[in-house]
Image: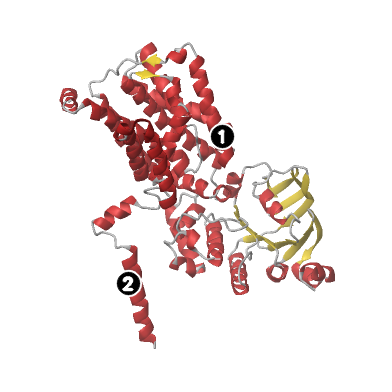
Amino acid sequence: MLTLDKLYVNYGAIKALKSISCHVEEGEIVALIGANGAGKTTILNAISGIVPTLSGTVTFLGENITAIPPHEIVKRGISQVPEGRRVFANMSVLENLEMGAYIRNDKDAILEDIEKVFVRFPRLLERKKQLAKTLSGGEQQMLAMGRALMSRPKLLLLDEPSMGLAPMLVAQIFAIIQEINASGTTIMLVEQNANMALSIANRAYVLETGEVVLQGPAAELAANPDVRKAYLGE
Amino acid sequence: MGDFLQQMVGHINPYYLQILVNIGIGIILALGLNVVTGLTGQLSLGHAAFMSIGAFTSALLTIKLGMPFSINLILTGFITAAVAALIGLPILRLTGDYLAICTLGFAEIVKVVFLNLDITNKALGLSVPAAVTSIPMPVVVWGVVLLTIICVTFIHNSRFGRALMAVRGDEIAAEAMGINVTLYKVQSFALGAFIAGVGGGLYAHFMGYINPSDFGFLKSVDILSMVVLGGLGSITGSVIGATILSAAPEFLRFMASYRMLVYGGLLVCMMIFRPNGLMGNVSFTGLVLRALGRKPHLKTVMEQKISETSRSGNGDT
C-alpha cells in the first residue's frame, strides 16, 4: 500500500533520515519505534508531505506522492494525527470534526461519520459544544484521532498517541487504535512507548539516528534481547 | 431618490457629517484588516499601504479616465487585491514577527514609490475631483459599510471562513486537514486588500486631496488598533473599535496634542483588562438572542444539568 524507498531528509546540515526503506501493507498496523531524535516523526512528516525530501520516493497505492503538497496527499487517503494532537483550540469539538471532513462535500455522509466518531468516543459526544482547548489531554487525543478519521483515510498516521497520557488512558487509546484497524483502516504508528506499540502492531521498524536498524514481526522484535534491552527497559 | 438623499444629508451639520464619514471609512478598513489579522491570524503592519494604493488608483481612474464612480470603486478593489496577491505570494510563507516586518517594509516601499512617481504628483499629493454621483458621498460610504459588514459576516460563517480560522488556529493541523494554507492566506490577504482599496477610494473622493504621507506607518497602526480594541476576529468588535478610534480624535480635540496620550492609555488599559478586545470571545448573536430570551444563559443551563443529574443520582440510591 505504502512504500518508502531510500528516503533521505535533511534539516539544514543535519541528516535526519538516511536511506529509509520500509513498506506498509493494507490492513496492517506498523509501528516505528526508537529513541528521541531517531527520525520517527520525520518519516511520518515526509509521508504526509510536511517535510520536503532530499531524495528517494514515497509511493502510495501505486502513485509517487513524494513531491505532492500535504493538502493534496490528504485527498489521496492519508491522514495524519500530528504529534502533540494539534486540535483547533478555539473551535468546539463538533467544529473540529467538521474541519476534519474539509476535503469532503457529501453532507449526509459527513453527519453519519460524525456520529460514528461519537459512538467510538462517547466522551466527545458529552463535550460536543465545548472548545477543544478545555478538553483534557486524553480527550484531545481522542478528538485528534476522530478528526483524522473524518477524511475517511485509507492510511492513518499516528504520531505518539500515548504522549503525556495516564497509563489507563494509554491502554484505552491503544484499544481504540486496534478497533479502528479492525474496521478497515491501515495504521502506521510512531511510539516512544515501545511495549504498547509492539503489543498491538503486526510489524515494526526500529530506528536509530535516521536509519532502520531492525525490522520484523512485532512479536519477534518484542522477544529480541537487544530490543528488550534498548527500548523495553530490561 | 438622489435628490431626496441630498436634501436629507443637507440637514445634517457638515462637521458631524465629516466625523460620520471618517467613522464609516474606519469601519471599512478595520473590517478588511480583521479578515487578515483577526480571522486568518496573519499580523499585517502595512494595511494603510493598500488603502494608499486604493486611494491613488481610484483618484487616477477618475482624473485620467473619468470613470463612473461605481465602476471605479470596484475596479480599484480588484487592482488593490491583485497587488496584494502578488506581494502576498512570497511573503505569506513567513509567519508572525517576520511577516509583520515584511508588511511594514512593503508599506514603506509603497509610500516612497508614490512620493517619487510623477503620476501621483510626487510629494505634493493629488487633488481629487468630487465623485460624480447622484447619491451623496456619506450615503455611499455607509452603503459600502453595510455591504462590507454583510460580506464579511457571510465569509465568517462560510466554509472558506472556517478554513481561515483553522489556519489561524494551527497551520500544520490545517494543512493536515487538506487545506492549502498558502493559497488561503493569499486569498484572505487579497480580500482584506480589496476592502482596504475600496476604503481608500472612498477616502480619496471624500477628502478631495490625498498625499502618500497620509498612509504611513501610523495609519497602519491606527487600523490595527481598531481591530485589536474591538477584539481580533470579531466583526462587531471591529465596528465598535473603528467607531471609537475614528471619533476619539474629534472628541479629544480640546486636549490638542495630549490626545495621543489618552489614546495610548486607552490601549494599555485595554490590554490589561480585556486582552481579547472589547468583543473578543463574545458572541454578538448569542448576546442578542439571550436578550430576546431565545437562548438561556450558560449558567442556567449548567444549573439545570446539575439538578437533573443529582435527581437521577438520588433515584439510583
- B181, above or below A186, in the image: above
* Of pointers 2 and 1, the one earlier in the residue sequence: 1
Q: Position of residue B59 (x, y in %)?
A: 38, 18
| Chain of the residue displaying label 2 | B
Secondary structure state at the residue bearing disc 1: helix
- B300, above or below A81, in the image: below
Amino acid on which disc 2 is placed: Gln
Is disc 2 in the same subunit as disc 1? yes
Q: Quadrant of residue B23?
A: top left
Q: Position of residue B140 (x, y in %)?
A: 27, 28
The residue beneath circle 2 is B304
The residue beneath circle 1 is B101
- Residue situated in front as seen by the camera: B50 or A115: B50
Q: Is residue B201 left or right of residue A2?
A: left
Which residue lies at the image location 25% right of the left edge and 56% below the top edge?
Answer: B291
Which residue lies at the image location 40% right of the left edge and 32% below the top edge?
Answer: B195
Decide if residue B34 is in sight here: yes
CB atoms of marks 2 and 1 within 8 Å: no
Decide if residue A60 is in sight here: no
Secondary structure state at the residue bearing disc 2: helix
- B196, above or below A95, in the image: above
Q: Quadrant of residue B236?
A: top left
Q: Position of residue B25 (x, y in %)?
A: 34, 31
| Distance CA(mark 2)–CA(mark 1) | 51 Å
- Residue situated in front as seen by the camera: A164 or B126: B126
* Placement of the N terminus of chain A among the 4 image quadrants: bottom right
* Placement of the C terminus of chain A among the 4 image quadrants: bottom right
| Chain of the residue displaying label 1 | B
Q: Position of residue B252 (x, y in %)?
A: 32, 35
Q: Is residue A221 left or right of residue B2?
A: right
Amino acid on which disc 1 is placed: Ile
